[in-house]
Image (cartoon, rainbow, N blue to C red):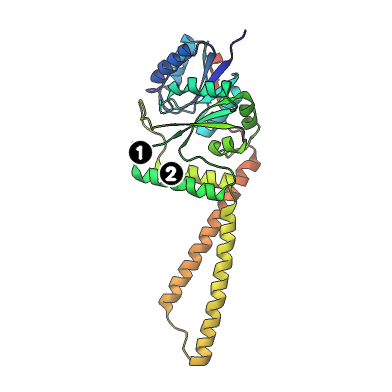
Amino acid sequence: MKKEKISIIVPCYNEEEAIPYFYEEIKKVAQEMNYVTFEYLFINDGSKDNTLEKLRELSRKDKKVRYISFSRNFGKEAAMYAGLKNVTGDYVAIMDADLQDPPSLLPKMYNYLKNEDYDTVGTRRVTRKGEPPIRSFFARMFYKIINKMSKVEMVDGARDYRLMKRQVVDAIIELKEYNRYSKGLFSFVGFNTKWIEYENVKRVAGETKWSFWKLFLYALDGITAFSVVPLAMASIMGLLFCFIAFVMIIVIICKTLIWGDPVSGWPSMVCIIFLVSGVQLFCIGILSQYLSKTYLETKNRSIYIIKETEKDNK
């Protein structure tokens, strides 16, 4: 009887130090799970260090190791999409190379999919130990905000690390949008999901590529990709300020006609102008976010461009 195959997708950006550690750990898990076969697809997302050379060495040494190298840095979302499109396994896992996604969870994840009525097994961190407090605070606030705005549930602490059946992978591949937010896409396609909780694990090597600013922009992508509530908020704020302005006009006219109170006070007027202008710019900013996403989608550019694969390394 033919063994089932598990494909491991590993997005890499400047991970030359972490790749050897990851490879040794995933090999141990593969030996433990000898009832299935494995393939490893590393995605080199335009790394500027020796990540590509490390992948070339591994692919020459181990036929199970495949890699795709992009022509430049397209981002983790593009790397995950490329991996999903090019793997061949019956089950597909997405993992980071820094071992913050413990490979030791794979046997348990596979058992849930094989023996219970689940289509995908996701992982979520129950602690954010080791993260800067300010980043943890904003992360928790993001999930609270987006779950109130969006009809698609976003699980607090959810990682990209998950094991999926082929049916789930095929459904995600069908979503060909350019502006991708995979945590939302995983929830959007549905299917029965089992969540495994674990404590935060420090990187085995190297440094994180996610600065606070990058995480902030990524959060904006998530909100604009799965909610139009900000547009409604802009409309409501516009109506509210029109109503306030109308009331204030009536108040000023009444004060002038009844009490003869002159209209004066340029400092207060300047403050009002600044406030209203700020609200207008804020609302225009919200509109521009959605307009920019629409603009990028209509150009229909490639999500990624492949420069080299393991087939070119023979």
Please say if the residues under marks 1 and 2 sit with CB atoms less than 8 Å apart: yes
Q: Residue at x 62, y 35 (%)?
A: 189
Q: Choose top left, top right, bottom left or bottom right for residue 213.
A: top left
Q: Is residue 276 above or below residue 253?
A: above
- 159 vs 108, nearest the viewer: 108
228 left or right of 260 in image: right
Considering every residue shown, the one lying at the far top of the view is 1
Residue 5: x percent and y percent?
57, 16
Rendered image: mark on residue 131: 1
Residue 48: x percent and y percent?
42, 27
Considering every residue shown, the one lying at the far front of the view is 116
Residue for badge 2: 139
Q: Choose top left, top right, bottom left or bottom right for residue 287.
A: bottom right
Q: Residue at x 42, y 47 (%)?
A: 138
Q: Earlier in the sequence, mark 1 or mark 2?
A: 1
Q: Is residue 263 visible?
A: yes
- 272 vs 201, nearest the viewer: 201
Q: Tag 2: residue type?
A: Ala
Residue 134: x percent and y percent?
36, 46
Q: Is residue 74 visible?
A: no
Query: Does dot 2 land on a helix, a strand or a loop?
Result: helix
Q: Choose top left, top right, bottom left or bottom right for residue 312.
A: top right
